[in-house]
Amino acid sequence: MAHQTAQRSLAGDVPGGGDRRQGLAFVVPALLLVTVFLILPALWTLYLGLTDYRLTGVQAAHPKVVGTANYTHALGDKDFRDALGRTLLFVLGSAIIGQNVLGFLLAWTLRSARRWARALVETLVLLAWILPGVVVAWLWIAFLKDQGGTLNAILHTPGRDWWFDHPMGSLIVFNVWRGTAFSMMLFTAALSSVPPSQLESARLAGASGWQQLRDVVLPGIRGHILTNTLLISLWTFNDFTPYLITKGEPHGASAVLPVYIYLTALPGERLGFASAISLIMLVINLLLALAYIRILRRRA
Amino acid sequence: MSPVQVVRRIGFYVFVALVTAFFALPMLWLVTAPFTRNPTLSVSWPDFTLGNFKHLTDDPNALPSLYNSAVLSLWTMLITVAAAALAAYALSRVRVPGRDGILYLLLLLSSVITGTSAMVPIFQLMFKLHLLDKDIGVILVMTGGLLPAAIFILKDFMDTMPKSYEESARVFGANSFQVLGHVVLPNVRPGLATIAVWAMVNVWGNFLMPFLLYRTPEKQPAAVTLNNFYTEGGQPNLALISTFSLLYSIPVVIMFLFVSRRYGFRFHGGIKA
Amino acid sequence: MKVSLEEVTKVFDGGVTALDALSLEIQDGEFFALLGPSGCGKTTLLRTIAGLETASSGSLRIGDRDVTRVPPGARDVAMVFQDYALFPHMTVADNIAYPLRIKKVGRAERRAKAAATGEGLSLGGLMERRPAQLSGGQQQRVALARAMAAQPTVFLLDEPLSNLDARLRLEARTFLKKLQHDLGVTTVFVTHDQAEALALADRIAVMESGRIRQLGTPREVFQRPANVFVAGFIGSTPMNLLAGECVPGDGETATSWGHQIDVAGVRLPVPEDIVTELTPGDKVIVGIRPEYLTESEDGIKGTVEIVENLGTTSLVTLTTTGPSVQLTVPEGREPEPGATLHVTPAPGRLLVYRADDGELIDAP
């Protein structure tokens, strides 16, 4: 019945508000943890970005509020702008294009593949995703290094240090390897949600494989594509694994924003400035998310 | 088969072969180097020696750090699952205006904050709370970061459960805790298992938080210890690194196999379009 | 136990009024049906009795006890849900024993009681299965057994037969009626299927927009629907509802001495018991079931348009100068499409409703 679901309550809408209070009690532990260890640090970042806080020296004991100086400084800082540019390239190349496209291709081709082929590919792709970051970092150092790197052995290019020669290109390839599993799984789920009857009607109307993809499948999973793009963009944007591989070397040429923030804050000891960058990063993240929500709303 | 089909078939196998190579090649080192005497960064036919494992047991921090990782993972998992289950149930059943929006925002925030953005304030917060260099500090920070996504996933499982199950129990006289324990939780077991494994894998692999919040080497988990193996000459000790990497990866692979056997490593409707 | 509702109103958060100052008394041991189209409030009423919804105003008593504000578990009622709500992770035995588990009955006693109840509903061999391994009919019996195990004073059934396929539904209907008769416990059930309500219930409340439009035995509700809404809702073939007007009789025959009703040019006699209630010029709606229309020499004239075979009878649709009219004819007497037919209501079967409010004109 239509209004049967109009009211949902935890312990029945028994008067006296017992249900609401109980519902609140259920939420409290999670709320407390999230507030203290997630929201509070986020707000703190906002405050720190307004100070000249440093790790050592006078400013460590008595940080001064310097207002928006850190922000104007950051926006005018060449190192920061370079790091931001690298990050955008990293997100665009490895997530929005790389993981999205490869993930979809895998989901699409493996749909009709034999069991063993499917199991083999899926296992490998997922393995790359679930191995701990520090291990993966070593694997890729070994894979692309000059001294005996596996890639050099295959390409017969001994002594070539891919991490030195093409730091960003290597990072992008690495991140496609690392993160495609998520897109693959999401698109596999998405494809199975396209009603077979729609594909069959398209086929009866004489649509080719490509036409079916364009006219039936892609419109049907637009929401999934959006969700996927947003999530992998955010994760890539904030990924710290590049530090574990290159530490930002050579000369900051592989320093994406998270690495740049780390280098500024700890070895560089400029905590206020690093917080300002963090906040700029947070704002970019939120803008990404809001843009996504708007697109999704408009669709609905 | 028509020529078009043949071409398509060949194209398919070429694609599968390329993908397999791309994903498998970087992993080869992980299975060869640990069994090689004095391994380098190159992949070579192993000597099938177990000497590296012997060396690893001699290292004072190596094996204990795996134990530390296990402790962190288990505690974080337990707290995350418990808090997320309670919150997801309440949020799934009580109407709160703007609930989904807030939850979504928290989810996005969590994927941002746990990275480097909040590194500095988290460090200061833990310093003020006297939780630096303590297990509980890392556990709580990790829990806070994992909770939004855990609630999000679990709420989705609970939303799909027919409401009549709970109502039926309530008409028979069950209170909220009985409804949760007898009916709701057993029914979302796949969801609980998913977030439990997901939380453990996350903590097990996390480098930044323990790196930031621990001072004492003996307390550090495996993720940090892995980067502390150096030879006397100051070079990375590849024998220990590769061997330790393998040991450190095995639990993750086992958990992955467990989930994929038991529940299928897929989305259970956890991600909505 | 008796269930009495007094002026019960339920307004949902969104402002939808599901129950509108509804009063009702259900007798002890009665098999009572709440019947109506979807959205009429019948399920809300059932859920309010169960305690899953709380009345916004008014009072609800079970027996002599006011339970308006009592939580569901403390009302001594048991409910069988439309989807049965069997717990998929529990065996049949555990499902049946669940109410006892809540009441902290010991494990051994629980098992024994569940086994006995299950046996009574021929679930003996299925006790260790999971609900997913049972057929629809078996699932329904498990749900009934679970409700019985709670030993409630009132049974509440939400669309008890709707999840079964057509064949099984008839079987389950007979079973349910026998079970209720044997147990003798007050039972309230919700249905949108008028045939189900007529077949099962001792009394029926026909609902529309949160109000009861008619309360009565199946016979009363079927034979004398109190208003046009009920008239249109009850009956497996819809009642003919024809607009007409009261006119002075022409006095030619004994039956046309008084007033008559003019329906599309055809004069029908006003039923004797209500002649004093009508004056010429009154707009009325004439209700006549297809089953009670018979072929005759004169009467409403129409052309056969469609003939639908219903098994032992056929439903014939006639086009007339006015609205179309339906009647049933016995097996083997079907007219050919295109044939001309005269039909007239069987004596005493004509119902007359006031056109303005749709209420039945009853004997004074």
Image (spheres, rainbow, N blue to C red):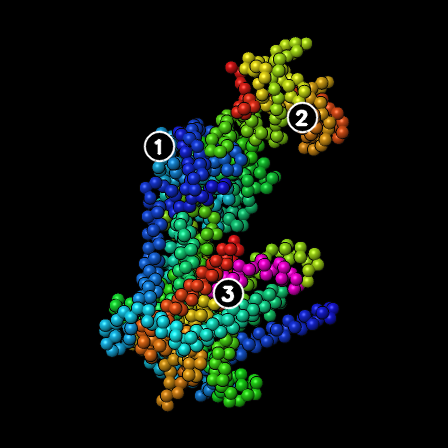
Disc assigned to residue A229: 3
Letter of the chain that mark 1 sits on in the rendering = C
Q: Are marks 1 and 3 on the same chain?
A: no
Letter of the chain that mark 3 sits on in the rendering = A
SS for dot 2: loop
As drawn, C165 above or below A268: above
The magenta stretch is A209-232
Quarter location, residue C288: top right
How many angstroms separate mark 1 from mark 3 (CA)?
57 Å
Q: What type is the residue that disc 3 sits on?
A: Thr
Question: Closest to the observer: C86 or A15?
Answer: A15
Earlier residue among tags 1 and 2: 1
How many angstroms separate mark 2 from mark 3 (CA)?
64 Å
As drawn, B111 above or below A173: above
Image check: C306 left or right of A131?
A: right
SS for dot 3: helix
Q: Main secondary structure of the magenta part?
A: helix
Residue identifier under label 2: C322
Disc assigned to residue C66: 1
Question: Closest to the observer: A62 or C189?
Answer: A62
Q: Position of residue A67 (x, y in %)?
A: 30, 68
SS for dot 1: strand
State yes or no: residue C19 in magenta. no
Question: Closest to the observer: A40 or B80?
Answer: A40
